[in-house]
Amino acid sequence: MSLRKVANVVGLLQVFVALFMASAAGVAAIYGEAESALAILAAAAITFTVGGAVYKTTTFEGDVTTREGFAIVTLAWAATAIFGALPYLLTGTLGSPVAAVFEAMSGFTTTGATVFSEIEGLSHGMLFWRSLTHWLGGMGIIVLVIAILPYLGVGGMQLFQAEVPGPTPERLRPRITQTAKLLWLVYVGLTLVQTLLYVAGGVGWFDAVNHSFSTLATGGFSTRDASLAAFESPYIHWVTIAFMYLAGVNFALHFKAATGRPMYVRDQEWRFFTLLLLGAAAVIAALNLTAGSYDAIEPAIRHGLFQSAAIITTTGFVSADYESWVPGAQMVLFTLFFVGGMAGSTGGGIKAVRVLLLLKHTLNEIRKTLHPRAILVARIGRKPIKEDVLAHVIGFVVLYLLLCLSGALVMGLLGMDPLTAIGASIATVGNVGPGFGAVGATDNYGWMSEPALAILSFLMLVGRLEIYTVLVLFHRETWKARRSYH
Amino acid sequence: MRVVIVGAGEVGFHLAQRLSEEDHDVVLIETDPDRAEFAQQQLDVLTIVGNGASMSVLEEAEVRNARVIMAVTSRDEVNLISCLTARKLGVEYTVARISNPEYYNRSSVLSREQMGIDLMVNPERECAWETYQLLQSSAATDVAHFAEGRLQLIGLKVLEGAPIAGRTLLTLGEELEDRHYVTAAIVRDGVTEVPGPNSTVEVGDQIYLIAPTDEVKDIPPLAGHPRFALRRVMIAGGSTEGLYLAKVLEQHGIECTILDRERRRCVEMAEELPRSLVLNADATDLELLEMEGVSGIDGFVAATGNDETNLLSSLLAKSIGARKVVSLIDKFEYLGIVPRVGIDASVSPRVSTVNAILRYVRRGRVITVASLAGIEAEAIEFQVEEGAPIAGKALRDVGFPKDAVVGAILRGDEIIVPRGDDRILVDDDVIVFALPAAIHDVEQMFS
């Protein structure tokens, strides 16, 4: 493990972050918010200087080893969240450094949990910075660097794998740099289309851009206190539903469709994800109609679909206060917290493919009690899944659930009621944002103590980097070379 | 006819044996000196030690004067290059043994014609396909196909209570007038006879019939076999043939269980067979066979790759009540005992490959030849050429050998069940069933 190499990449990354931060200062300037613009610019300058200095004083030689890859990705994300917190502090938007890091972490990990009870009073510059952190974190800051710089070379795949969600990332092109570029291209393209559709529906440019950033990253930050409920037009809701869904689908599939090879239907994970979403929405709509929460069919379906999509893709937008729905509808949403988007999407959570694989494996185990000597292979589509991949997935799901449970336990110990504790834990590990109880649809995380915010920030990071990447750094052997006898 | 065979493995050796016994000049090319030496001693053939894909070796084998080259090594690519090279050197027909489906698929970029190969044979697939046909035609001990599958030759035993037992062929022919069966042979007490109108069918006879494929299913009930539908099959042994058969069964929607003792092989098969149940077990594990429902199963196939294990496994399956048991047997010595010990049928991977190749290379315009495992007889499909002695004459006038019978005449899409006054015309396909003594005479009449 060469810390010099790790520091080098992490430093370089901060230079990039600083450039994006400066763009937020530009937005503040456009809206005539001089004070805010200067503060953000100062934050950018500090980030640039520190990052640049680290980059200049260290060197990067050779390739990235597996261990270094994990360290680079985890530390890069942690550093990015810390520097990303500077604008909140320097503009005086937030006083507590812990709360600021929480907000920045929530942004970069596309969780969308906020400590603000009112955001409409924030400057345009800061609102833009919040949304921008989502957008950068959505496709991945490392993937962005790989796309721009061939500098990481062979080790790029290591980092790519550690950051892109899903069991095994798909290569679209022989070179990892090209793959990263294509993914970003699709991402930027979809963001552009959504923005235009918003503007066509009468949304102002600022709101349109910010919400598009937030949607495509499956983040959840809004520029309005009431989130998407602030827009009454059903058209805006439908556009948001469509793009939340698109952001939850594997971007490799989008790329293939854009190049004239649509393969959605052939992809079993896609079918599973889509049917699950539609099924959940239908059940919620039916329950809400029966209970009389909505008078008309369209709003019932729209809000059912909106909230289902917002939770399953881990976006976390709110179009209606789902905590006022009947318990059945709430429990359906609760279940969706554990699914997440597709592998290769910007969504968080366990990921549809892992849930699907686990279900298949469980069915196989049941079948195996009937045929004790049977050799059964789980498949996704036609593709048989190797046993080691399956073991990895089972390990992941167990760790994920353990993490949710221990998160909830700690929140409980810190004095939260069980529903809030569980809600906060699953909403941060899954990068969803809003949970249940005191962190529900219309609430925020601002009331929490600093230790609680710190722990939840960590959970968001672990959830975004899919657990193993972060937890492996806590393993002794990552830091010590294993003693070798030959 | 001069024949060059590349590869003296199982298939190559027996091809060489069969062809040299039929008075063809065989040159056998083999890389392994020991194996070449063995073939030299055992067979009346010329062996050359060398790489069959190399031009100099092929020239040494005088491939330009050969009628056919048969590249039957276990490596597809060697076989392909052998054939390509030999074709350039001027050989007339090329036959390649190809196991990888990608090479013979119609979707392949390189078509068979482009590669200059007249026949591609996949031994494992031939064997699996033959086994499948045997399973499907419940009562049959032998099945062979003619005219691209439009006609079948099936062999089966006449059981107690069969409607046809004790009758002469003449009366049967009158009763079953709307059917198109031809009785090609009757085996009674080990003696094979091509029957005449006055021959009778008795209980215990083994009879061979030629019939259109769509009418074959009506034959077993006439011979006293119950009707049955193939729904559930177990394959004991994950040999290549076994795996192919499982794929064929899956394609036809038949429930299939396949087992192998090697765990790794099981995983491989489980990955390739989405709808079959793969078990990691021994083919002779009686307890397991019972637990997995072999009693009452429609079909049981032993395909472990080991003759002795196959025989034992088949016997176990039969003893606990599997309905149709087929064993894969490679050793010719064992083929004879299969019917005697109560196993319903056997398929020899080697024989099915050799058959598939021989079909294309017989003298004259022979299209298909089927050698039957149990008896000394062959069913041959001829195409009638201009100037053949038999062309244009009525059957009763040609003086057909006593030990041979015309099973069917195919004229375009029409299938004719021949009577004495039917004529054989140029371009007809004719299926002849003949005992060894008559084969030579029959071939004369068609060449």
Image (tube, rainbow, N blue to C red):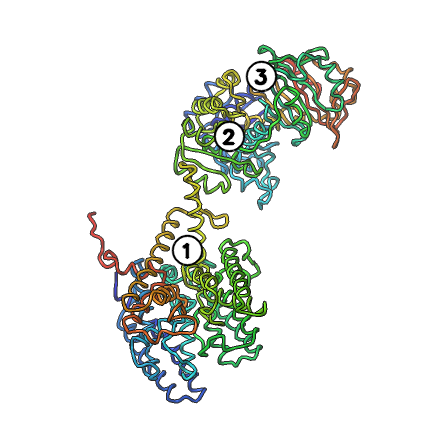
Mark 2–mark 1 distance (CA, rounded to whole Å) = 45 Å
Query: Disc 2 marks which residue?
Result: B6
Q: Is residue A149 left or right of residue B357?
A: left
Give the percent coordinates (x, y) of residue B59: 53, 31
Which label was assigned to residue B375? 3
In which chain is the residue bearing label 2?
B
Q: Secondary structure at mark 1?
A: loop
* Whether marks 1 and 3 lie on the same chain: no
Label 2: which secondary element:
strand
User: What is the distance, in whole Å, between disc 3 and disc 2 at their CAs?
Assistant: 29 Å
Label 3, residues with CA under 10 Å away: few <14, some 14-19, many ≥20:
some
Residue B209 in the image: above or below residue B255: above
Tell me if residue A110 can be seen.
no
Q: Amino acid at mark 1?
A: Thr
Disc marking residue A168: 1
Chain letter for the residue marked with disc 3 in the picture: B
